[in-house]
Amino acid sequence: MIDEKARTATLTDKGRRKAEQYFGIENLSDPENSTLFHHINQAIKARGIMKLDVDYVVKDGEIIIVDEFTGRLMFGRRYSEGLHQAIEAKEHVDVQRENRTLATITFQNYFRLYHKLSGMTGTAATEEAEFREIYKLDVVIVPTNMPMIRDDHPDVVYKTEAGKFRAVIENIVECHEKGQPVLVGTISIEKSEHLSALLKRQGIPHSVLNAKFHEKEAEIVAQAGKRGAVTIATNMAGRGTDIILGGNAEYAAKAEMRKQGFSEELIDTATAHNETSDAEVLNARTTFADLERRYKAEYVPEAQAVKDSGGLFIIGTERHESRRIDNQLRGRSGRQGDPGESRFYISMEDDLMRLFGGERLINMMETLKIDEDTPIEAKLLSGSIESAQRRVEGRNFDIRKHVLQYDDVMNQQRGVIYEQRRKVLDGEDIRSSVIKMIEDVIDEKIAAHMAGDVPDNYDLAALTADFKGLFLNGTELEVPTREDMEKVTPAWAKEILMRCAMAVYERKEKEYGPIMREVERVVLLGEVDRKWMDHIDAMDELRRGIGLRAIGQRDPVIEYKFEGYEMFDAMTRAIKEDTVRKLYLVRITQGAAPKREQVAKPGETPSEDGKGKTVQNKKKKIGPNEPCPCGSGLKYKKCCGKNAR
């Protein structure tokens, strides 16, 4: 059973019986079969919900996730809980082992770490409420530099997707014949390739820009304003690159320099402004300046011809769930006072209309007996589309807010743990912290075995057993006579245990000398990292099932806070106890300094035999003028590549 709205897939009763028969078990819902049940659910989700060239692509034998908002490939990211492995099995590529989460934080809490927050974007107005509620930021709309004269045509709605695409092709052909450049926006790689195939049948030359061909992104988008150009793009749509009507002289000059045999490095230096006396660089700069002037002169009449034809025409083949994404696509046209047009083509088979548009529109089209090639333009339809988008945006905001409520619990715990790690990594003397841990562990054990005020109920044997072999021989807490039991109190036991513990610890310090400080750091850091990773997994498990508490009329978030605190408290106690135990049991071979162990090494994944296997970086070198892989939209040399040299 597939729920596309919630993006979940579950077995029906028939499917459950089939699974029980296949795996030879009596009841799939039994607790001992929970892991199998989880794997089955992930497998059917991979099969029924996750779509190739929409949610992910297969590249170089790997599954690469596609960002639903930007359309970019997210290298290094993997779905969790076995879903990525299920997709790998579905697409018949090598199934890799599950990653271990070393640290986790939401974007909201990550941004909150900054003391000052600000930003500038052309599409913040629709998200104003979220900025105010989550970040306490106001949104101010700045007037455009030049009047915006773009003509935004009303949406047209078709009954079927086939009818919609036929209308899109007709519009493209009409614009192409009069020399008007067209940028077509699609919501997935799959749709962009389908539209490309339809254009090829019509013999219309065009460029395709999606996550599969992102290497030429800036160049393709830069020339999307040339007379008669047709460009098909996903949501990535070349952000950060202005589409200049008539053509981009800078990119044309660079392309000509490549034809003349100039290297990429030399072309890059030709567009720089630093002083140099290198004759080769000076020659490249002269060549570039001459070519740019020539192309600018050539593009002047072409730019005027494009403006006379109406400017860049934006065609949206589907409304996105977020109005912000639609506004970003529209905003590619009509920049700096240039003319332009935009229109969205919608079908009742689109995901947004099918899932959130309601049945009223479909029933109306059926009643009016509208065929699939007849478009509808009406305020009722535009209102329904806007309403559907607002509902989806509201639902997504509620999801993000809900996630943030849970992460706020982890955020407090994260602060405590990272503060402890920072002290260790900064090389601070943590001897006093270790002594405090020893005292806390002793207090905890005394509270467990010497509760109450009745000495006969005290379990001194169990208390001795907890510390025997660490700093007790076994006779320190013995009471010779019945009369002596009167002096047995928790304070008496603590005084003896602390005296013995400090005597043994000081002997150890004397034996190992200054190296003991490094031993303390190594042991504590290892325990903190190990326990924190286990805690992250445990909190994830708790969060997955905590929603069921609502059935018992209890707030899942409040329950998560209470149980999360108890689990964190248990983790900190375990860190203290295991750190103290290891420090007393550690033996150092003279002459060998202790080595800090990395719990998980970057660049390695565990192989089947459990040994580390180095992951080869097969990605090609990023050119200085290519888009920065971080997704900022800037050139690599002006973003993450600033200090790369």
Image (cartoon, rainbow, N blue to C red):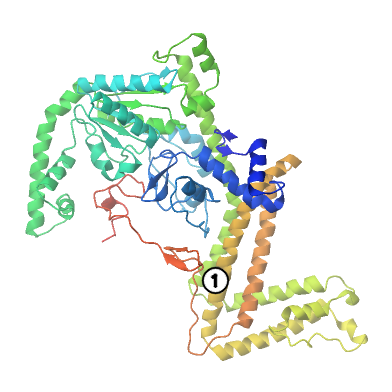
The quadrant in which the N terminus is found is: top right
Residue drawn at x 68%, y 83% is 470
Relative to 456, is 522 on the left or the right? left
What is the x, y in percent for residue 549? 71, 44
Whether residue 536 is situated above or below residue 352 in the rendered picture: below
Whether residue 260 is situated above or below residue 180 in the rendered picture: below
Q: Nearer the viewer, residue 28 or 97?
A: 28
Check the image and name the residue furthest to the top: 368
Quadrant of residue 120 within the rendered picture: top left
Quadrant of residue 472 within the rendered picture: bottom right
Q: Nearer the viewer, residue 28 or 364?
A: 28
Whether residue 102 is situated above or below residue 309 in the rendered picture: below
The quadrant in which the C terminus is found is: bottom left
Quadrant of residue 570 within the rendered picture: bottom right
Residue 555 visible in the displayed image: no
Relative to 119, is 428 on the left or the right? right
Q: Nearer the viewer, residue 52 or 543?
A: 52
- The count of marks equals 1
Residue drawn at x 35%, y 46% is 632
Q: Secondary structure at mark 1?
A: helix
Whether residue 114 is situated above or below residue 417 in the rendered picture: above
Amino acid type for the residue under numbered disc 1: Leu
Relative to 415, is 193 on the left or the right? left
What is the x, y in percent for residue 19? 64, 43
Which residue lies under the disc numbered 1? 525
